[in-house]
Image (spheres, rainbow, N blue to C red):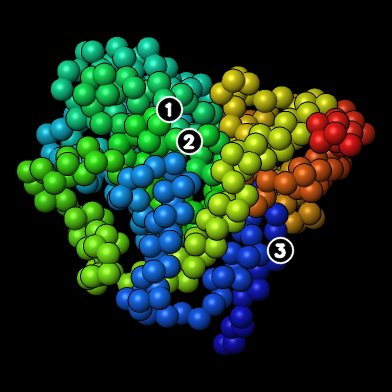
Amino acid sequence: MSIHSFHPPQRTLMGPGPSDVSPRVLEAMARPTIGHLDPLFVSMMDEVKTLLQYAFQTRNNLTMPVSAPGSAGMETAFVNLVEPGDRVIVCQNGVFGGRMKENVERCGAEAIMVIDDWGKPVDPDKVETALKANPGVKAMAFVHAETSTGTRSDAETLVKLAHAHDALAIVDAVTSLGGSPLKVDAWAIDAIYSGSQKCLSCVPGLSPVSFSERALETIRTRKSKVQSWFLDLSLVMGYWGGGAKRAYHHTAPVNTLYALHEALVLLQDEGLENAWARHDRNHQALKAGLEAMGIRFVVDEEWRLPQLNLVTVPEGVDEAAVRNRLLNDYNLEIGSGLGALAGKVWRIGLMGHACKPQNVLNCLAALEATLYGFKAPIETGVAIEAAQRVYGH
Ligand SMILES: *Cc1c(COP(=O)(O)O)cnc(C)c1O
């Protein structure tokens, strides 16, 4: 047996994540591994916390990356805040709200579901009705940017409703952080988690989280122990908190944290508002091109996520065959539909480093060529021009 080194091809990642990683981030990751308690590493960790506070727009002291992907950030929020016997309102309008329900129930708590159709935002009226009907709920949880449908919900309004009924607000920002406006302090979010591999242009494997003072107080006054040893924030904080005196909890993923540090430096240098504007502009160009071709968007314009474009597959087209052709002939990855949307839609991501004019134009050209090859009912020869008009040249 002789197995050789693995050399992946250079793909362009325009699906639901992971998205393209900046070469600067990959280069940072290849720097020498040092000890995870090395004073130089500890000061880099402090910088990561500061940079994350900027990305989240928060002064929350407990702001740090969990050493595992976004799902672990989700689990961190629930296992620390929810105890057996609690009741939590969970809003579901796609795949990820369903995972929140799983988390609540595995904490021994009751999930009170507020359901909206896939492709629609969470309806604040339904949330208010649920809050009124269930006085004393511990928390209300929702997904800010539902990656399964490309739908944004009105986080600011939903958090206000939770607080008006004295419930904590838990927010999934895995796909929104760095891609669309998100203001943890201004919106008074209590617990939020994200992922490194969506709009932050970083490799997968880390989950930035942030907890408000009120959330910390809730954790401090728990009656029961957090059932997860690894995700128990009172233990994790001994490593990520406490200034210079750090206690060993687990071995931090040293090089992956170099990567996140570099990705956050890139975000700081670009400026958060500029990053949001870049995602919007490239989305507008992609939209113009796709619509010129005759491909339709599913989500109402007001609630569309620029970083995740949910579009219908043209009539009679085998969507998986198109994706395979894009991957094999153009090294371009786009996403398929999930659940009831499987086979009917594509999810075209414009996240982080992948969100640039070059990718928009390449994607439009490759999709047009592929669909033309499959004899799909589309307009040809108009998409690139429509996109270029948005870019203004
Ligand atoms: C990707 C994603 C997750 C899960 O993150 P992983 O890094 O895959 O564990 C959770 N919520 C949303 C909205 C996501 O898009």
**Residue 371 in view, yes or no:** no
**Residue 353 percent coordinates (x, y):** 65, 52
**Mark 2 neighbour density, 10 Å: few (under 14) some (14–19) many (20 or more):** many
- Work out whether mark 3 precedes mark 1 in sequence or the reverse, and give the earlier one: 3
| Residue at figure coordinates x 13%, y 39% from the top left | 84
- Work out whether mark 2 precedes mark 3 in sequence or the reverse, and give the earlier one: 3
Q: Which residue is mark 2?
A: 182
| Residue at figure coordinates x 39%, y 56% from the top left | 49
In the picture, measured across the screen, residue 242 lies left or right of residue 50, that is left
How much space separates mark 2 and mark 3, taking CA atoms?
A: 31 Å
Q: Is 325 in front, or is 83?
A: 83
Residue 10's disc number: 3
**Residue 14 percent coordinates (x, y):** 66, 47
Q: Which residue is mark 1?
A: 155
Q: Is disc 2 in contact with disc 1, using a CB cutoff of under 8 Å?
A: yes
Question: What's the amino acid at mark 3?
Answer: Gln
Give the structural element (helix, strand or loop) at label 1: helix
Q: Residue furthest right?
A: 381
Q: Is 89 in front, or is 1?
A: 89
In the picture, measured across the screen, residue 50 lies left or right of residue 370, that is left
Question: What's the amino acid at mark 2?
Answer: Leu
Marker count (numbered): 3
How much space separates mark 3 and mark 1, taking CA atoms?
A: 36 Å
How much space separates mark 2 and mark 1, taking CA atoms?
A: 8 Å
Question: What's the amino acid at mark 1?
Answer: Ala
